[in-house]
Amino acid sequence: MYWEPERECMDRDELRQLQLEQLQATLSRVYMNVPFYRKKFDELGIDPDELRSLEDIRKLPFTTKNDLRDNYPYGLFAVPLREVVRIHASSGTTGMSTVVGYTKNDIKTWSNLVARVLTAAGVTKDDVVQIAFGYSLFTGGFGLHYGAERIGASVIPISSGNTDRQIRIMQDFKTTALICTPSYASLIADTIQEMGININSLSLKYGLFGAEPWSEKMRQEIQEKLRIIATDNYGLSEVMGPGVAGECLERNGLHINEDHFYVELVDPETLEPVPPGEVGELVITTLTKEAFPVIRFRTRDLTRFIPEQCPCGRKTVRMQRVMGRTDDMLIIRGVNVFPSQIENVLMSVEGTEPHYQIVVDRKGALDEVTVMVEVSEAIFFDEMKRQTGLVETIKKRLSSELNISVNVKLVEKKTIERTEGKAKRVIDNRKL
């Protein structure tokens, strides 16, 4: 199913020409209306009117989250505030918030792009969509809400939290599609089991999850527990929110809406393009945003492109599910370690639960990693010999995957704090 087939299945040459025209128009607009970009371009001797090919984008400066914070709140807006009909912002947990704005046309575009993602994942006007993202300055809840309404689905704006109530609403309102973070979906699945509810009594068919990295193993477990088709979707507040990319029912890579975003993959150290097929940091340039266009925004998200055309018929490039972030990456004794690598190993070991936490300490001059792993009650209360065997199995597999040794500690179910939003996977106690 397609929402906008003429765009989603556009010929690649035609698409690149459209991207070039949109990029040229965007650069002219930000040069005229955003002092930050005008200063950057002038310092580098860049004349936006001289951009002749998409490859010329490499001459342009990157935009970082710090640039957005330094221009708080409205310094990067490209239109007067009177034309801005919506303002969102990041949580600001790692510093000052980043503020983004939308014109009336931006909201329409946003709704359409989310409608594409929902349609690709199987959602139609006949579905009842329960949105368990927070309705706040965070873009997730409102973005998916407007997209679901755009396709004509019935929307339950329940927001996040109160898991028991979420499940009662699912039962009473006949929810068919659940939208939230994958870690919260996992918590909902566990709670349904604990409440003794027969999963077949629910009407759930689809789960659209995003806002945090998750593994294929975690997808399989959620699908089995909730008896749904689970798809990944991607977006970020600084660029637009949800709707940048999403999986179709093939579930093999997220289709990027390239008629609205120009994407690159760069080496996070050298900032040079990575070879085709290799993992790099995703960089996004908006092509149609009016209120808040961004040029070469460094997302910090690590992924790779899948160049082959998808069997679904869409011709847009796909990106692999985000494997981690450059700023979530841990450097342990000189080795780069991502939480997603640890999750992949844990999900492959029978007896472990999909809840874990990575604790990093510095003992003397050496870093020490302890992976806290929840296990089933049968294992936790079993004989010490079996527990020791499981710990050794996990340690060996992690050592093979990470190329460093780590400590493993088994903990009882529900020992690790649950969250209704993004899971807190890492506690880094080092004073770096």
Image (cartoon, helix red, strand yellow):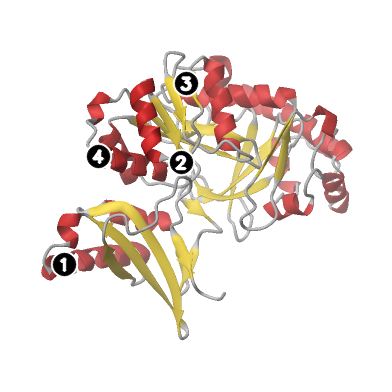
Select label 4 or label 3 by which is in front: 4
Label 3 packing within 10 angstroms: few (<14), some (14-19), many (20+): many
Side of 24 relative to 370 (left or right):
right
Select label 4 or label 1 by which is in front: 4
Side of 226 relative to 103 (left or right):
left
The answer to which of marks 3 and 2 sits earlier in the sequence is 3
Instruction: Residue type at mark 4: give it.
Output: Gln
Report helix, strand or loop for mark 4.
Answer: helix
Q: Which residue is mark 2?
A: 161
The answer to which of marks 4 and 1 sits earlier in the sequence is 4
Residue 249 shows in this picture: no
Q: Which residue is mark 4?
A: 193
Side of 116 relative to 251 (left or right):
right
The answer to which of marks 4 and 2 sits earlier in the sequence is 2
Report helix, strand or loop for mark 1.
Answer: helix
Disc ID at residue 389: 1
Asked if the residue under mark 1 is in contact with the one under mark 2, i.e. CB atoms within 8 Å, the reply is no
Instruction: Residue type at mark 3: give it.
Output: Thr
Q: Which residue is mark 3?
A: 119
Asked if the residue under mark 2 is in contact with the one under mark 3, i.e. CB atoms within 8 Å, the reply is no
Residue 233 shows in this picture: yes
Name the one closer to the observer, 5 or 208. Answer: 208
The answer to which of marks 2 and 1 sits earlier in the sequence is 2
Name the one closer to the observer, 378 or 299. Answer: 378
What is the C-alpha distance between the residues marked 4 and 3?
A: 29 Å
Label 4 packing within 10 angstroms: few (<14), some (14-19), many (20+): few
Report helix, strand or loop for mark 3.
Answer: helix
Label 1 packing within 10 angstroms: few (<14), some (14-19), many (20+): few
Quarter-wise, where is residue 409 in the image?
A: bottom left
Select label 3 or label 2 by which is in front: 2
The answer to which of marks 4 and 3 sits earlier in the sequence is 3
